[in-house]
Image (tube, coloured by chain):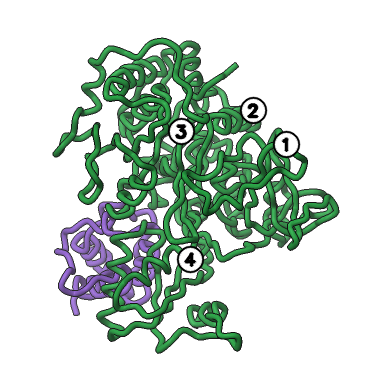
Chain colours: A green, B purple
Amino acid sequence: MFDSVYSLLAAAAERHANRTAVEIAGQSMTYAEWKDRADCLAGFLRDCGIQSGMHVAFCFRKSLDALVALFGIIRTGATYVPLDPAWPAHRIATICDDAAVHHWLGSHPPPDGVRMMECVLASAPGDGATLVIESAARCPPMTGDPHPPHDDVCSLLYTSGSTGSPKGVRITGRSLLHFSQWATETFAITPNDRIANHAPFHFDLSTLDIYGAIRAGATLCPVPDRIRGFPGELARFVEAQRISIWYSVPSILSQLASRAAISNDTAETLRVVLFAGEVMPKASIRRLAGQFPAARLANLYGPTETNVCTWHAVTDADLADDGPLPIGRPITDTRVWISDSQGQTSQANDSGELWVAGPTVAAGYHGGTTHSNAFVPAPDGHGIAYRTGDRVRRRSDGVLLFEGRTDRQIKSRGHRVEPGEIEMVIASHPAVREVAVVPIPDPNFGHRLLACLASNQDRISAQDEIAAYCRSRLPGHMVPDAWVFQESLPRNDRGKVDLRAIEMLGRS
Amino acid sequence: MNTRDQLRQYVFGTLIPTPPAQWPADDVDLLDRGLDSLRIMQLLVFVERDMGVNLPDHELTPERVATVAALSSWIDERRR
């Protein structure tokens, strides 16, 4: 019934024309208004030359404009590339270059250092803005059938890359349609629901909030950027906005459960609490279940390359036992295999690397042959499977348990982080001779990051300088939290850098 | 050291290491300079443990921790 992502909004505008679609900071718009504004903006974008096959930078704080711009781009058939306004200019520039972006839509014009764009639309007027988004309402709307995106690639989501630069995951319209259908059915989302949107646009968690809300005709309530990390403010937001569905990384929920006062009203209204992105500590899930006795709690699992591919509804038995919270079973139409160390995916394997195939699996990486060995022919001969790099075990009742990584990838504040990418940045600083980045487990935040380095400068001046250098090139969650200086990095008897020994330095 | 000096030292020396010549003024927004949720929690632990001042969670708002100036007046208020 839905043949494109745009058709989700078109259908909602028809069926739920006057329902509130989005509410943020005292402003709101209905589904009919959302579609009308997106159509007008799309008309303007098309006149700028934006069309299917092009990549458009999408760099917004949470706002109505952002959601209008999102569907303006989708309407033209172009591919949106979400960027975070809080990222350093250097990272934004790197991604704009990699994605060959020529058009910019944002809360503000592009930061210094980003190359010239053919067309810049911004919410706030500034140097070089072609159009302030609000005034697009006066443009003649784009009409006719929506243009399908090239190769069905609706967006490029950039994630940390082990070879030193971020890589763009090609998210298809098919994936967004399938996932939003699964979510709407599984959690019985209705027009009466009010869904919070906590995750930033460049984080795949946000696709459930946005496309799930539209598919069901529910109200989307984006969390204002400024209160994202403040548990007390978030609790007040959930209460004032009468949120019924919440989806975020576990570290935010852990804080909400332990550091904020939850009113009885909130506990009754909030009926679904979902989390993904990192391991949810058992103590936190117990506290959450205590705070929200009436809510359905569920663990959703999947790297950006698969969106959500397995899930697990939290049971009383999970709360009682001391084992890890399962990542569960595949979502509809999704197949999984467990591969042994030889790359064999026999059904008899009960532990090894998880491979996933199905409609939510991405269409590979942008421009990338370098990482393409992660996408392989599916073992059953139908389409492509993604090798997650996650080690899992199948429990006797069939649910999957996450047991760690086959490589060095780690999670920090729910974001995935390749230590190799941080090491490449640090190693490019002239004062650094060698460096290794390792995780230090943190009870609330999954991991903190420790950089161990050998420098040819004295420690005091080097640490500040190198940290500042990292902040100018990496997003906040990738900047190391702790620094250790050594004469040289510890090595094992085969001469390899001893990461275990460095992790122990971080614990002492 | 007074409250502001102690905070400056911890924030720009440890939490968001910054070369001393580039330490910003006390009214500069720290949330824009890399003070994310994990670092805010570390900051609160520092204030509680090393400065001996208890900052209640329900009073924690962006306005109260966004700048060294605001945070130090919050701390001084709680000291009384």
Q: Are marks 1 and 2 on the same chain?
A: yes
Read off the chain for label 4. A
Local packing at callout 4 (Cα closer than 10 Å; few below 14, some 14-19, many 20+) is many
Q: Secondary structure at mark 4?
A: helix
Which residue is at a point 63% across and 31% down the rendered structure image?
A182
Look at label 4 and name its amino acid.
Pro
State the separation of the CA atoms marked 3 and 4: 39 Å
> Does the CB distance between marks 2 and 4 fall below 8 Å?
no
- Circle 2 sits on which residue? A185
Q: Chain of mark 1?
A: A
Quarter of the image where the N terminus of chain A is located: top right
The CA distance from mark 4 to mark 1 is 34 Å
Residue A120 vs A306, above or below: the answer is: above
Tag 1: amino acid: His
Q: Where residue A419 is drawn, which disc sits there? A: 4
Q: Residues within 10 Å of mark 2 (few under 14, many from 20)?
A: few
Q: First in sequence, mark 4 or 1: give its number.
A: 1
